[in-house]
Amino acid sequence: MTELGEIIGWHDYHDSFGGKKITTINPPVQSGSTVLFDNYADMLAAQSGEYPGVTYGTGGLTTQKAFEEALCKLENGHTTKAFPSGISAIINTFMAFIQSGDEILLCENVYSPTARFCYKVLAKYGVKVNSLASNIGAEIEAQITDKTKLIFLESPGSNTFEIQDIRAITKIAQDNNIITVIDNTWATPLHLKPLDLGVDVSIHSATKYICGYSDILMGVATVNEKYADVFDAFYHSLENYTNPNDCYMALRGLRTLEVRLKAHEKSAFEIAKWLEGQTLVEKVIHPGLCSHPQHHLWKRDFSGAAGLFAFTFKQDYKDEKIGKFVDSLTQFGLGFSWGGFKSLITAGRFKRGDKWSHNGKHIIRLNIGLEDTQGLKDDLESAFDKL
């Protein structure tokens, strides 16, 4: 049995009716506000903060706990909490560990809402935000001060796909007692185990590959033993919880993650290699290709690849021309997010520091879904003719 199968497996969830047991493979979708205690002693324990169980619906009920437990095992973590969205998981992680007067180091290639929260909200409350090069490694030590509290990574970044040297960064962070957090959405817990590399908190937008069908918004954060108590206390003080129906769907998605991810990976590699041979294409930006500048780090730390990558054209086309290319595609939807069964495309120019990434050319990002691979190549080839 695979790692995922061993962790999730199946369970004998049951109730009874008519004197006969009702047995199901999946946990029930438990929804409620009031949680009943068995006795007054338990209620007293809850009032004094010593009750080990759930005391109210905002603590997360059976379905949420089942999902969190499964993901925590996959991440080799100590505690996992689910949130209503990926950015919610990120925001709550920041708020759990930093306060006014702290400094944080933020990689330039992070998810744009992450950067927006840091520069627009955290900065307003007296937290200093310093940017890091997207391919940072041991040289991060030069940017650490006595006020540095947290380092936030995203490896690879989901638009320009730079990879950080996680091992080098976490060693330096541990030596300086600095918390490290990584957005691990691209790799999923199957292809990268950040906590095994010394990272303290691993975050996923479960909206993407874990749920898998572009119909659920959810985030998860998994914390190591060192910081679990602090994170847990903050989580409960804000009464965070996630919709039980969404948790059920996320757990169901987790069961098929390995199968889906293999299909995404295989098709994406095939299309990426095919794109390398197209006359209009200048560069394919895929961490799993030898041409990627941090491929050696991907090969060292990751066990596989996702279905999300990008490419650039040799010619610097204007927006109108890029629009003709994108709008002529019939197999790719034009929309944000990724990780679902439907292939998607976005296009944009991105700055890293004071320079434009890839000479300021449009970065064409492809989310390779579960459609026929040859059909996707034919669609792209037809769109190339428009250029």
Image: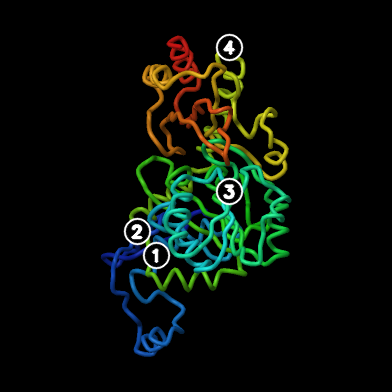
Q: Nearer the viewer, mark 2 or mark 4?
A: 4
Marks 1 and 4 close (CB-CB < 8 Å): no
Q: Does label 1 or label 2 sit earlier along the sequence?
A: 1
**Residue 173, percent across and down?**
68, 60
Give the label on residue 244, or none.
2
What residue is shown at x 43% (from left), y 54% (from top)? 120
- The answer to whether marks 2 and 4 mark residues whose Cβ atoms lie closer than 8 Å is no
Cα–Cα gap, marks 3 and 1: 36 Å
Residues at marks 2 and 4, CA–CA distance in whole angstroms: 50 Å
- CA gap between label 1 and label 4 equals 54 Å
Q: Position of residue 233 (x, y in %)?
A: 48, 73
Q: Position of residue 47 (x, y in %)?
A: 38, 86
Say which quarter of the image contains residue 45: bottom left
Instruction: Tell me: 271 left or right of 217.
Output: right
Q: Nearer the viewer, mark 1 or mark 4?
A: 4
Q: Report the front residue among 286 and 153.
A: 153
Q: Please, what is the three-letter code of the amino acid marked with disc 4?
A: Thr
The residue at which mark 3 appears reads as: 107
Marks 3 and 2, how far apart in space?
33 Å
Q: 315 above or below 357?
A: above
Q: Earlier in the sequence, mark 4 or mark 3?
A: 3
Residue behind mark 4: 279
- Along the horizontal axis of the image, is 33 left or right of 366? left
Task: Rate crowding at label 1 as few (under 14), some (14 to 19) or many (20 or more) other CA atoms within 10 Å.
Answer: some
Q: Which residue is mark 1?
A: 62
Query: Mark 1 near mark 2, Cβ–Cβ under 8 Å?
Result: yes
> Marks 1 and 2: which is nearer the front?
2
Under mark 3, the amino acid is Cys
Query: Looking at the picture, which amino acid does disc 2 mark?
Result: Pro
Q: Nearer the viewer, mark 4 or mark 3?
A: 3
Is 94 located above or below residue 47 in the figure? Answer: above
- Under mark 1, the amino acid is Thr
